[in-house]
Image (spheres, rainbow, N blue to C red):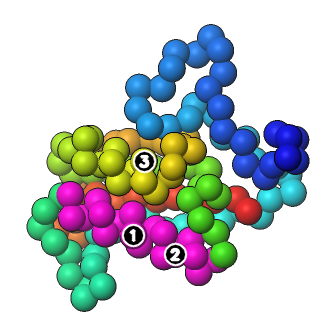
Amino acid sequence: MNNKEKLVVRYNPEPVPKPVGHYSHVTRVSKDADLFVFSGQIGIDSNEEIPSDMNEQVKNTIKNIDTILKTQNLNSSNIIKVNILATEEIDWVYFDSIWDDFFQKDYPSMTVSYVSALGWTSLKIEIEVWAAG
């Protein structure tokens, strides 16, 4: 399948500097794709509890994103844009290990913002994704 036949194509054009993290500068979506916009996902676990540990919240949040994608017959390769909101410094070594496993190095476009608070005081990270399929 060539790039014109793909619904989602990711790339880093020249002469733009290489990404400083695990993301793509450009994600192109075919006009033939359906667009899915998801609410921000949080680190709540299967017992509906929010762990106090940031890395546990990261792990749960990615799991929740995977679950909601599957409800729409989508997977990580359909994600076109990620917005990450965090209230404390992200452990990038841990985050990238989870991120790499989830995306298999086919990274979407991404924005990261540090904020003073999220919707609940116990939340340390919220990740919003947009997908096409």
Q: Which stretch appears magenta? A: 55-72
Mark nearer the N terminus (1 vs 3): 1
Q: Within 10 angstroms of label 3, few (less than 14), some, or many (20 or more) residues?
A: few
Q: Which residue is mark 2?
A: 68
Could you say where residue 125 lies in the image, as x and y percent from the top left? 28, 58
Q: Within 10 angstroms of label 2, few (less than 14), some, or many (20 or more) residues?
A: some
- Contact? badges 1 and 3 (CB < 8 Å): no
Q: Which mark is residue 100?
A: 3
Mark nearer the N terminus (3 vs 2): 2
Mark 1 vs mark 3, foreground winner is 3
Q: Residue at x 56, y 71 (%)?
A: 69
Could you say where residue 115 lies in the image, as x and y percent from the top left? 26, 47
Vertical arrangement, residue 99 with respect to residue 25, above or below: below
Tell me, yes or no, whether the highlighted magenta stretch contains residue 29.
Answer: no
Quadrant where the image shows the C terminus: bottom right
Residue 32: in sight, yes or no?
A: yes
Residue 115: in sight, yes or no?
A: no
Mark 3 vs mark 2, foreground winner is 3
